[in-house]
Image (cartoon, coloured by chain):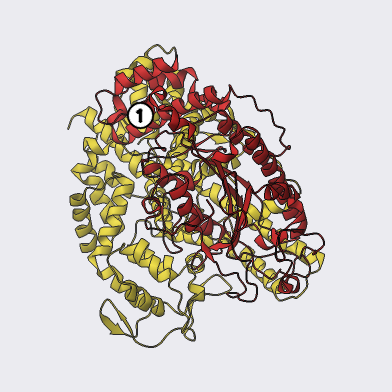
Chain colours: A red, B yellow
């Protein structure tokens, strides 16, 4: 069935219900300038608690070498950014982006009363809650809920994965998870599935059953839109061969094909390096850097870097002192990376971690992560951050 | 009440109080009064036995070994190996424990008890790294699932799993840790708005000294207990943890909070406050007798009203257990059940946080719904599942140790068998396609579904079609 045809039928069927689902608004009706101003946010999650101090190395600080005699990165190996901090050598691919002014580093991002459990801390980062607050919606999900001008489509937020993270789940709206647009398209176009959603729309006003049907219809409509829009674009940039780079490649394909999605979410896991950290973290950082290098340059080549902001976070950093197994244990504040063509403050955003002034062996945070989110919501996603974060957070000057 | 109503009411009762009902049982029970069927649920054919995947001896042996290793400054490679082996063995046991419980839900003769245990599992949500503690807590929840809420609450509060999870091991005189005290009131009993921050602080002081020993048993430690007076809910005295729990239970708000949660789980996502109030008064008057409360609930006329039938989204575990029970499914690689729990967002023993699974519409997003619609045909038709779960954050250390970061296997066979002949033999030979649909689905079967299944040549096709419908996600 033609898309247009589908819309007609769907609109007809929904005429009796009160709410006309957002996806039914024809794309043709969107003003051109609305399309051209499309800004993208890409969230990169490093799961497991990436060791920030061996990522952005405070090589100018002796305490670092004293506390990490088995795993410290030697000064001569560090890719120096200023007199104090430099990149892990496995991040050499990022140096190029850094020099172009496409990268910023925010040191010591965290929150009050940090939790050292992976699960809980990831929850806090994804829901943007306080440490003692339990929310069942994520910050991007609540952005979708906010009904802002630019978050009206079910595919406003896409996670390139098989299942959806809490961050992407709102109360009434949720992002969509897909690893492969063609596979989702095939699934939603199976005859039985299509029959179910085409037969009649009686259920759209029924509480839970209506919700199931609405989700099916939106999934199907999104799958069609994503597949049909993105298949036209032929990627012309070569990415390294890793699962992570593949996710970024998919995101790039979506962005470059002009998909009207605002938020993309990808993740790379394995950062819980309690034992023999150097090799494990090094390997992951290399994958990360190579992937990011290709992604950012690909976007630049396609004139999309100006419209894209990438953030990278991990649920916590690790303790300043190494442990007895040449690894590090769960810590607190951590650095965040930003990439994009329109960064206001390029390079290192704030002071390096103060290793002389610790809280029980852990870094103290300088920046609340919700100030980072708040800045993005206000300045990039065009929604007042108090609507999403439940209270107003100060904005920062990185964009 | 006519025969047809009774048929659908019994089906509703068994869907909510248990995990569905077999056709012959349904026919048999629908000849009797609904109250008789309710009573039947409370007469236990077999008492709930404990899960016993990890024996106390095995646990003690591990503890002993670990204590020895932890005492050392440097570990030899053999000792490191030993420690790793224990971690591995524990992870293995955790999975076994999970599967053991799921299999029990699938095959139990006492579905109400397991359903209640599932409810308490979500209510007293807890993650325990040690499977022995997880098993202990699960057994406490089962043993008291239909007993006294007071006993249940007391035993849960004293379980090593909870003491550890909510940091009461660190709650000591002079250095109170408020975590347990706060969640006790916010999530386990009273709910927000029915206590003050001072109450939390004073209760935390009262719970100092509540700890567990190396044998995994509760132990009150007088040395770390704060012996000074505390002022809780306006009363002053040298309270201990028991006294705090007594006072919390003395507040009728606790009864309201629990009844509202039970109502949301068993009746409707949107609580009817008049019904909740009615239940709460009864529960309080019956001194928190859970069994009495549940009989009251299942006997209430409103439990069978139209708006409360076929409108609840099955939780992932309810969905998997219902399906497996209904079709007598054997899983040749039971591990798939863990993958499915994880992919669908309800990995037992691993709730997202102490608030448990939010439930309701939260179970459903585009990807989980697509998977849920596909699972019945995969399980009943032994298909291929093209789906990766997310890595559990607790598994990150294991992933970190793997030599290469490679994409996880994309395809895994469900590798299960439904006992079709057993299932089909339950039905009359002249069973119509629409009747089969009506039996399998809780929402009313309208024209669309009748039309869809009418042309099927056999019941098996109808079954696969019907279980793949969004309507099958409801109970």
Furthest residue in direction bottom, as rendered: B228
- Relative to B73, B150 lies left or right: left
Q: Is residue B293 left or right of residue B130?
A: left
| Residue marked by disc 1 | B441
> Considering the image in quadrants, where does the C terminus of chain B appear?
top left
Instruction: Please provide percent x and percent y for residue A363.
Output: 60, 69
The answer to which quarter of the image holds residue B214 is bottom right
In the displayed structure, B211 sits above or below A390; it is below
Element under label 1? Answer: loop
Residue A191: image location, x then y, percent: 47, 17
- Residue A311 in the image: state x and y as whole percent: 57, 49
- The mark total stands at 1
Residue at 46% across, 63% down:
A131
Q: Quadrant of the N terminus of chain B?
A: top left
Q: Is residue A182 above or below residue A286?
A: above
Q: Relative to residue A227, is residue B70 depicted above or below?
A: below
Q: What's the residue at 34%, 87% (across, down)?
A: B229
- The answer to which of A74 and B54 lies nearer the viewer is A74
Label 1 lies in what chain? Answer: B
């Amino acid at each position: 069935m033609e898309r247009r045809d589908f819309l007609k039928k769907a609109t007809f069927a929904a005429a009796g219900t009160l709410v006309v689902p957002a996806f039914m608004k024809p794309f043709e009706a969107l003003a051109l300038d609305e399309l051209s101003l499309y800004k993208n946010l890409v969230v990169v999650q490093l799961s497991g608690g990436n060791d920030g101090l061996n990522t952005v190395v405070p090589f100018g600080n002796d305490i670092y070498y004293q506390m990490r005699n088995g795993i410290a990165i030697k000064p001569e190996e560090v890719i120096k950014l200023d007199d104090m901090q430099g990149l892990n050598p496995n991040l050499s691919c990022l140096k190029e982006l850094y020099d172009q002014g496409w990268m910023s580093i925010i040191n010591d991002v965290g929150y009050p009363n940090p939790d050292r459990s992976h699960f809980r801390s990831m929850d806090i980062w994804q829901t943007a809650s306080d440490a003692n607050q339990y929310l069942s919606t994520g910050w991007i999900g609540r952005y979708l809920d906010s009904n802002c001008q630019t978050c009206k489509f079910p595919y406003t937020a896409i996670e390139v994965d098989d299942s959806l993270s809490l961050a992407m789940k709102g109360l009434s709206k949720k992002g969509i998870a897909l690893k492969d647009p063609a596979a989702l398209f095939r699934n939603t176009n199976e005859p039985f599935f299509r029959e179910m959603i085409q037969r009649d729309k009686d259920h759209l006003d029924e509480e839970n059953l209506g919700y199931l049907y609405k989700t099916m219809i939106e999934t199907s409509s999104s799958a069609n839109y994503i597949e049909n829009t993105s298949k036209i674009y032929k990627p012309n940039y070569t990415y390294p061969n890793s699962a992570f780079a593949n996710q970024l490649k998919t995101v790039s394909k979506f962005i470059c094909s002009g998909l009207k999605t605002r938020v993309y979410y990808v993740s790379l896991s394995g950062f819980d390096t309690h034992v023999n950290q150097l090799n494990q973290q090094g390997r992951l950082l290399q994958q990360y850097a190579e992937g990011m290098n290709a992604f950012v340059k690909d976007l630049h080549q396609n004139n999309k870097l100006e419209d894209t902001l990438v953030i990278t976070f991990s649920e916590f950093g690790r303790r300043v002192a190494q442990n007895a197994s040449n690894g590090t244990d769960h810590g607190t504040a951590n650095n965040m990376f930003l990439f994009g063509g329109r960064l206001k403050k390029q390079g290192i955003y704030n002071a390096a971690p103060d290793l002389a002034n610790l809280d029980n062996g852990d870094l103290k945070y300088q920046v609340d992560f919700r100030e980072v989110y708040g800045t993005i919501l206000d300045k990039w996603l065009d929604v007042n951050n108090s609507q999403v974060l439940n209270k107003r957070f100060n904005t920062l000057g990185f964009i | 009440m006519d025969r047809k109503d009774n048929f659908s009411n019994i089906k509703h009762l068994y869907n909510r109080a248990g995990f569905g009902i077999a056709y012959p049982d349904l026919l048999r029970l629908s000849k009797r009064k609904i109250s008789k069927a309710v009573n039947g649920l409370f007469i236990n054919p077999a008492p709930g036995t404990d899960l016993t995947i990890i024996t106390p001896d095995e646990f003690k042996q591990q503890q002993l070994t670990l204590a020895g290793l932890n005492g050392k400054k440097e570990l030899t490679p053999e000792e490191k190996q030993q420690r790793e082996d224990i971690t591995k063995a524990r992870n293995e046991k955790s999975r076994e424990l999970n599967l053991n419980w799921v299999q029990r839900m699938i095959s139990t003769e006492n579905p109400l008890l397991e359903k209640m245990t599932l409810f308490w599992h979500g209510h007293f949500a807890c993650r325990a790294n040690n499977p022995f503690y997880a098993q202990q807590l699960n057994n406490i929840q089962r043993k008291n699932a239909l007993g006294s809420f007071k006993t249940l609450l007391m035993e849960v509060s004293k379980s090593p799993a909870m003491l550890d999870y909510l940091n009461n091991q660190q709650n000591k005189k002079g250095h109170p840790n408020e975590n347990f005290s706060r969640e006790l009131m916010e999530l386990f009993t009273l709910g927000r708005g029915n206590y003050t921050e001072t109450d939390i602080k004073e209760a935390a002081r009262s719970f100092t000294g509540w700890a567990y020993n190396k044998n995994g048993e509760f132990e009150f430690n007088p040395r770390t207990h704060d012996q000074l007076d505390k002022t809780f809910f306006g009363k002053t005295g040298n309270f201990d943890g028991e006294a705090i729990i007594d006072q919390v239970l003395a507040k009728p708000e606790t009864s309201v909070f629990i009844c509202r949660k039970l109502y949301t789980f068993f009746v409707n996502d949107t609580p009817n406050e008049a019904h909740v109030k009615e239940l709460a008064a009864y529960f309080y008057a019956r001194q928190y007798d859970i069994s009495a409360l549940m009989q009251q609930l299942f006997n209430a006329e409103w439990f069978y009203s139209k708006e409360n039938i076929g409108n609840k989204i099955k939780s992932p575990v309810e969905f998997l257990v219902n399906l497996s029970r209904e079709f007598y499914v054997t899983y040749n690689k039971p591990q798939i059940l863990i993958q499915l729990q994880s992919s669908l967002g309800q990995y037992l023993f691993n709730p997202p946080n102490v608030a448990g699974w939010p439930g309701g519409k939260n179970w459903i997003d585009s990807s989980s719904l697509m998977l849920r619609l596909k699972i019945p045909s995969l399980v009943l038709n032994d298909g291929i599942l093209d789906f990766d779960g997310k890595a559990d954050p607790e598994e990150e250390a294991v992933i970190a140790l793997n030599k290469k970061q490679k994409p996880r296997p994309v395809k895994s066979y469900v590798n299960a068998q439904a006992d079709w002949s057993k299932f089909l033999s339950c039905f009359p030979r002249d069973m119509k396609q629409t009747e089969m649909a009506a039996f399998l689905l809780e929402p009313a079967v309208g024209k669309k579904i009748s039309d869809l299944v009418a042309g099927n040549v056999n019941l098996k096709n109808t079954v696969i079609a019907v279980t793949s419908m969004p309507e099958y996600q409801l109970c």
